[in-house]
Image (cartoon, helix red, strand yellow):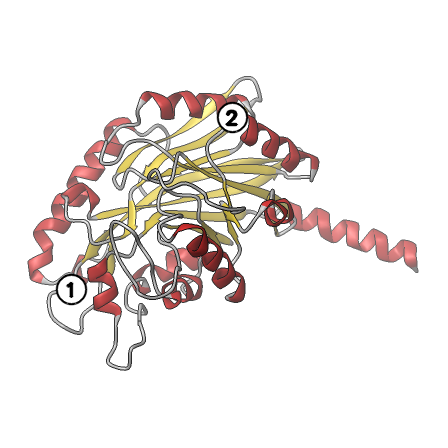
Amino acid sequence: MKLLSILMLSIVSLLQSNHTVNLAFVGDAMQHAPQITAAQRADGTYDYSDCFAHLQDDITWADLAVVNLECPLGGKPYTGYPCFSAPDSYAVQLRDVGFDLFLTANNHCLDRRDKGLVRTCQALDSLGIPHIGTYRDQQDRAQRIPYIANVKGMKIAFLDYTYGTNGIPIQGNVIVDFIDQQLIADDIALARERGANAICVNLHWGIEYQLRPVASQRTLADWLVSQGVDLIIGGHPHVVEPMEVRYSKEHDKNVLLVYSMGNFISNQSDIDCRGGAMVKVSLKMQNGRAVIAEPRYKLFFVQKPQARGENYVLIPESRPDLLRPDSKAEFTRFMSRTHDLVTRHNIDVPAEQ
């Protein structure tokens, strides 16, 4: 009977590992002061239920969806730029709309100093939200890294690093995962040792508002490809930058490289910052290893509130009928400029049809 049970489990595991695993990624989920004001209700609570509703089907399409939480949950008073602190209900709504993993290694993670970083970790833990990038201390990091999600029998490792913290120093024992090749190499090696079928490295890198990746991004991307990772997913510039599928001859496989997905949601006004891209990709097991399939992007636009009681709303490119008349010109301009950029520079990462 015991032998039969082991055999059945092995068969189930084998069948599951042949499934397709769908992943979705979005960029910087920000909370500027006007966003906090728009979400506040008369009873003092904060309601973000309108913000992401039109993208929920795309988010829940994914077996695992990832978002960069670019604002600490630092407690009151809630504040926007330059030092953010968002209500916990913001994270609740991101969770409830379907995001499964929050990235926290970014240049604003220490906006409320060590205390805010610790509170963010505690709040996400209390909400049952997996998160990587910042940690209470070294022991906490050792328990979480590498983060390996077992999805349909496929083990996918996720790592997260930032270029810096706006010059704010760590004062105690908290850990921020900074971009450091030795640290990343060690984490990749540990992920492989722990049985990861695929490795996704998330990076907060580049230069804000630059529409093309800079030399430091390209150099780091080249190195990560040489390390054999499967996905390189970037953010921070607040604008969409090109994406590509790159063949690694050394490892005989394709790698998905996304330099920047732009903003997920924000109050920024520059036309190139008024929206972002959701990147979708599938992973399939072939000959005992994971391969990427069908990478694509989908654009959306942030419609700002016009009147009291309205909230910020993400409008997919396919739903211009949801726009107010005063938003149509900016929507069209953002879509046109962003498509022009990625059409000219993307390599084998088309728009979703």
Judging depth in this view, the residue of 76 and 330 nearest the camera is: 76
At 65% from the left and 49% from the top, the residue drawn is 153
> Does residue 37 lie above or below 101 as drawn?
below
At 25% from the left and 56% from the top, the residue drawn is 80
Left or right? Give the position of 287 relative to 85. right
Image quadrant containing the N terminus: bottom right
User: What amino acid type is highlighted by mark number 2?
Assistant: Gln
Earlier in the chain: of badge 1 and badge 2, it is: 2
Q: Which residue is mark 2?
A: 181
User: What amino acid type is highlighted by mark number 1?
Assistant: Pro
Left or right? Give the position of 193 relative to 10. left
Mark 2 Cα within 10 Å, few/some/many (few <14, many 20+)?
few
Q: Residue furthest bottom?
A: 43
Q: Can residue 329 be seen in the rendering of this structure? A: yes
> Does residue 178 lie above or below 115 as drawn?
above
SS under mark 2: helix
Q: Which residue is mark 1?
A: 305
SS under mark 1: loop
Q: Quadrant of residue 310?
A: bottom left
Judging depth in this view, the residue of 108 and 316 nearest the camera is: 108
> Does residue 99 lie above or below 346 as drawn?
below
Q: Can residue 148 be seen in the rendering of this structure? A: no
The location of residue 35, given as percent across then percent down, is 23, 61
The location of residue 132, given as percent across then percent down, is 51, 48
- Gap between marks 1 and 2 measured at Cα: 43 Å
At 24% from the left and 56% from the top, the residue drawn is 32
Q: Residue furthest front?
A: 171
